[in-house]
Image: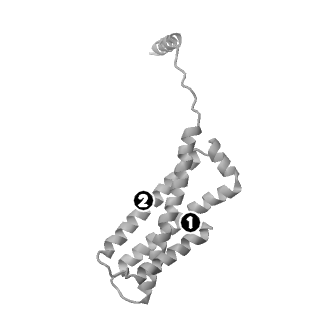
Amino acid sequence: MYRVTNPLISIILSLLLIRLGFNKDIGNFDKLLDSALTFTSIVIGFLAALLGILVTIKDVEIVTSILEHDQRKGALKHFFKETISIGFFVVILSSTLHVLYERDGIAVSIIFTIWLISILWFVPAAYRIISHMMGIVFKTNETEKRAKSRKMSEHEAQSLKNRLSKRH
């Protein structure tokens, strides 16, 4: 369901914003492009870090249950791929628009429209995957039982000190 609704909502919102007068000729559009580049790059980096966390906690019970369930695993994989792909697309379009935004023409208008749709698609997609991953990470911290630390007895500590002092 989401695979269709989010792009559709992004297209409708983009067309509505364009109809209301939002275009590349607004003031400080170059700063908006800079912000879009920065935000998207940060989110892509954060997603890469979350993937690293997922790999390190893959043996935890909740993560293994998600990864063993094909539908959940497929959804999680799709969420990552979709968000990262759209993010890179936004970066490319933002960079292109940064060079072309002062020009007029149908090509620049089309690129602007695609950029706007992509931005409006990327933000909720990024929110979705980050909130899912944060739920997994924090659920893991709640359910993971840590081994109790074993403090050395006085006898063990003294024995260790003796062995170490004999080496020197």
Q: Amino acid at mark 2?
A: Ile
Is the residue 76 above or below the residue 114 in the image? above
> Between 109 and 53, which is closer to the camera in this rendering?
109
Residue 89 appears in the rendering: no
Amino acid type for the residue under numbered disc 1: Glu
Q: Residues within 10 Å of mark 2 (few under 14, many from 20)?
A: few
* Residue 42 numbered tag: 2
Q: Position of residue 118 (x, y in %)?
A: 48, 73
Q: Secondary structure at mark 1?
A: helix
Q: Is residue 129 above or below residue 146?
A: below
Which image quarter is the N terminus in? bottom right
* Tally of marks: 2
Of residues 6 and 166, the one nearer the viewer is 6
Residue, x 37% and y 82% (percent of image)? 21
Residue at 56 percent across and 44 percent down: it is 139
The residue that mark 1 highlights is 82
> x and y percent of residue 2 in the render?
60, 67
| Numbered disc 2: secondary structure | helix
Furthest toward the bottom, the residue is 105
Q: Please provide percent x and percent y for residue 39.
A: 40, 63
Residue 8 visible in rendering: yes
The colouring scheme, among rainbow, by chain, secondary structure or one colour, is one colour
Which label number is shown at residue 141? none
- Earlier in the chain: of badge 2 and badge 1, it is 2
